[in-house]
């Protein structure tokens, strides 16, 4: 939706005035510089279980977040009250904190020439004016499709539909002032299967900026039930080493750990296994990883980062070589570098796919483990040590043999990244990270 409705544009304009007033008040109270953001959000959430409504919630929220700088001292405060009096009190609270804070030579606003001055239409706003009754009907239809799929689907954890639409305006005392509208909608279901006194659960979901881009409730229910049924009869494995495929919807976690290791905060604290690896190979030479913050309607698209710094498409990894860290203004100054426009995180992280889908990767792997679920948080970004609970399927001669549970996979992230064998073209578009299934050469499987 390129053109915003007049009512929404009027709201944005009003919020811009509030942010500008906040900047003026901060200067009046002694701040040498300041930045502020105001968000106004609304949405609907419904949950149905076993055909009955469990919850219906309408959400409305608004808030102001403010940071002031007095010299090189920083103070922050926030409020959900956008009245003039509350704003003045919030500014005063932030200034009090700043006056008592320690000086930090790296703190402060970005450089003026780093701020966004062009704002492409990213097509992010598709409000969904669905009534609660219609939302309940969709959730019930999704759950019914899952429950009717197979006689072994014995119970349900429920289906949920969520809508979100919001406006956000940010500005700073360097003259930056801009806002935009965005939306996000989702539908999910989780069901339980039972056979021979064994129970398993699985789920599926769909998410999009535009409700028209969501998968149908029937499709979501069917996929969730299929995933649940094929997990019945799961068993453990004996301890071994073997190749491993991370299914696309869990492979994004691997890239998340990689991003954590090249994030500025971890680098200047020297708590990363990829310390001092800029310009060096960290993946095989066929791997390309890049950020595309301006994709239309994409879930991670933004015109600028959380500091107002312009976002640009750029490579993080080219031909396996680490080309860029992920830096905010503060972390860049701590490292003696320049911000990469990543305050608040990465935006549409993409690893280029190969030519094979998941079935093709199974054939390439031959014998090994297909991972479809990960559990626990056993990841040490300082050393790269990796150990997590997992479930999935044992594969022989390129074909799934039986489901697997109650195992742990272990390795070291530095070795795992360098020993990446292939990336599938079965890309999962439901998150800020776009990746297909990922085949790794070898990991340790701990089981019976």
Image: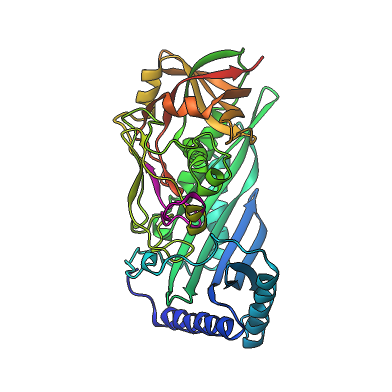
Residue 365 picture location, percent across and down: 40, 18
- Give percent across and percent down for residue 412: 54, 26
Q: Is residue 338 magenta?
A: yes
**Residue 426 % position (x, y):** 37, 36
Of 236 and 246, nearer the camera is 246
Residue 130 screen position, x and y as percent: 50, 67
Residue that lies at the very extreme toward the left in this rendered image: 355
- Which image quadrant: the N terminus? bottom left
Quarter of the view holding residue 439: top left
Q: Please indicate, yes or no, whether residue 49 appears anywhere in the rendered image.
A: yes
Q: Residue at x 42, y 30 (%)?
A: 438
Q: Is residue 92 left or right of residue 169?
A: right
Between residue 155 and residue 385, name the one nearer to us: 385
Is residue 294 inside the magenta stretch? no
Picture layout, residue 214 above or below residue 221: below
Residue beneath the point at 49% across and 45% down: 220
Q: Quadrant of the C terminus?
A: top right
Q: Main secondary structure of the magenta part?
A: loop
What is the span of residues highlighted in magenta in the rendered image? 334-350
Q: Which residue is found at the position 38% from the left and 59% from the top?
A: 311
């Amino acid at each position: 939706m390129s053109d915003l409705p007049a009512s929404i544009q009027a709201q944005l304009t009003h919020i811009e005035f509030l942010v500008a007033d906040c900047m003026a008040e901060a200067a009046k109270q002694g701040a040498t510089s300041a930045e502020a953001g105001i968000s106004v959000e609304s949405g609907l959430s419904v949950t149905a279980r076993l055909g009955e409504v469990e919850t219906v919630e309408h959400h409305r929220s608004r808030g102001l977040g403010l940071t002031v700088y007095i010299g090189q001292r920083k103070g922050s405060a926030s409020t959900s009250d956008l009245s003039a009096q509350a704003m003045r009190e919030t500014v005063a609270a932030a200034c009090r904190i700043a006056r008592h804070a320690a000086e930090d030579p790296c703190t402060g606003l970005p450089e003026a020439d780093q701020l966004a001055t062009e704002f492409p239409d990213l097509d992010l706003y598709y409000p969904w004016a669905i009534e609660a009754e219609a939302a309940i009907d969709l959730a019930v239809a999704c759950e019914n499709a899952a429950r009717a799929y197979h006689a072994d689907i014995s119970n349900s954890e429920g289906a949920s539909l969520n809508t979100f639409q919001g406006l956000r305006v940010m500005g700073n005392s360097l003259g930056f002032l801009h806002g935009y509208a965005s939306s996000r909608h989702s539908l999910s279901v989780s069901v339980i299967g039972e056979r021979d006194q064994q129970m398993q659960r699985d789920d599926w979901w769909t998410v999009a900026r535009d409700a028209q881009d969501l998968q149908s409730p029937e499709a979501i229910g069917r996929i969730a039930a299929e995933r649940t049924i094929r997990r019945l009869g799961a068993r453990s494995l004996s301890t071994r080493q073997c190749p491993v495929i991370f299914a696309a919807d869990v492979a994004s976690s691997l890239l998340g750990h990689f991003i954590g290791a090249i994030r500025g905060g971890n680098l200047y604290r020297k708590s990363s296994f990829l310390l001092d690896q800029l310009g060096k190979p960290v993946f095989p030479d066929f791997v390309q990883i890049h950020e595309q913050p301006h994709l239309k309607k994409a879930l991670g698209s933004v015109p600028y980062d959380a500091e107002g710094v312009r976002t640009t498409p750029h490579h993080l990894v080219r031909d396996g070589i680490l080309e860029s860290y992920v830096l905010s203004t503060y972390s860049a100054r701590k490292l003696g570098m320049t911000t990469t426009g990543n305050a608040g995180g990465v935006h549409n992280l993409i690893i280029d796919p190969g030519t094979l889908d998941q079935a093709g990767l199974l054939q390439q792997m031959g014998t090994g483990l297909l991972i479809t679920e990960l559990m626990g948080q056993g990841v040490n970004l300082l050393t790269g040590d990796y150990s997590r609970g997992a479930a999935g399927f044992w594969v022989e001669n390129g074909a799934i043999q039986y489901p697997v549970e109650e195992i742990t996979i272990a390795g070291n992230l530095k070795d795992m990244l360098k020993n990446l064998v292939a990336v599938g073209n079965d890309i999962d578009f439901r998150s800020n990270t776009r990746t297909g299934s990922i085949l790794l050469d070898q990991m340790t499987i701990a089981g019976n």
